[in-house]
Image (tube, rainbow, N blue to C red):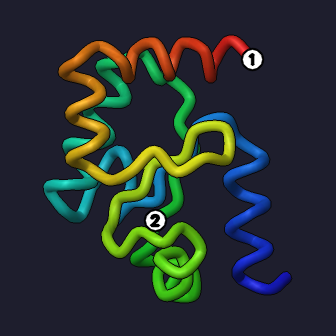
């Protein structure tokens, strides 16, 4: 499957997808760690993650797919939410908890 189609399939197959450096248990950058922590704190128990360090094709093409240059990248219901800073802002405002709750209920 071409990489752009694979990325599309991943974001459509799971309500919450985080493209990150490392894994939830062993994040390989502080931004990925903070984004994952915010998601967990917001009640997201089942986050599908993709380690872009182990997926060089995805790492190279995801910025073109999403028009977002950095990692991590959070998608909820196929829509790009943003990176670490936006995820943390949404968490601090309480909005991330609402978005996560709605995503997990569907």
Q: Is residue 2 left or right of residue 55?
A: right
Report if residue 22 is visible in the image.
no
Label 2 crowd (10 A; few <14 / some 14-19 / many >=20): many
Q: Residue 6 occupies which quadrant of the picture?
A: bottom right
Q: Residue at x 50, y 21 (%)?
A: 100
Which image quarter is the C terminus in?
Answer: top right
Image coords of residue 62 (percent x, y): 53, 75
Frontmost residue, 88 versus 25: 88
Residue linked to disc 2: 51
Image coords of residue 43 (percent x, y): 42, 15
Which image quarter is the N terminus in?
Answer: bottom right
Image coords of residue 49 (percent x, y): 51, 51
Alpha carbons under labels 1 and 2: distance apart? 25 Å
Residue linked to disc 1: 106
- Which residue of the protein is positioned furthest toward the front in this rendering? 67
- Determine whether 100 is above or below 70 in the image: above
């Amino acid at each position: 499957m071409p990489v752009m189609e694979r990325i599309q399939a991943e974001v459509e197959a799971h309500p919450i997808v985080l493209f990150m450096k490392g894994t939830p248990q062993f994040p390989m950058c502080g931004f990925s760690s903070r984004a994952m922590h915010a998601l967990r704190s917001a009640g997201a128990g089942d986050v599908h993650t993709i380690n872009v360090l182990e997926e060089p094709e995805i790492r190279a093409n995801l910025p073109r797919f999403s028009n977002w240059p950095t990692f991590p990248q959070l998608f909820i219901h196929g829509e790009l939410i943003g990176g670490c800073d936006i995820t943390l802002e949404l968490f601090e405002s309480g909005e991330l908890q609402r978005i996560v709750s709605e995503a997990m209920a569907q």
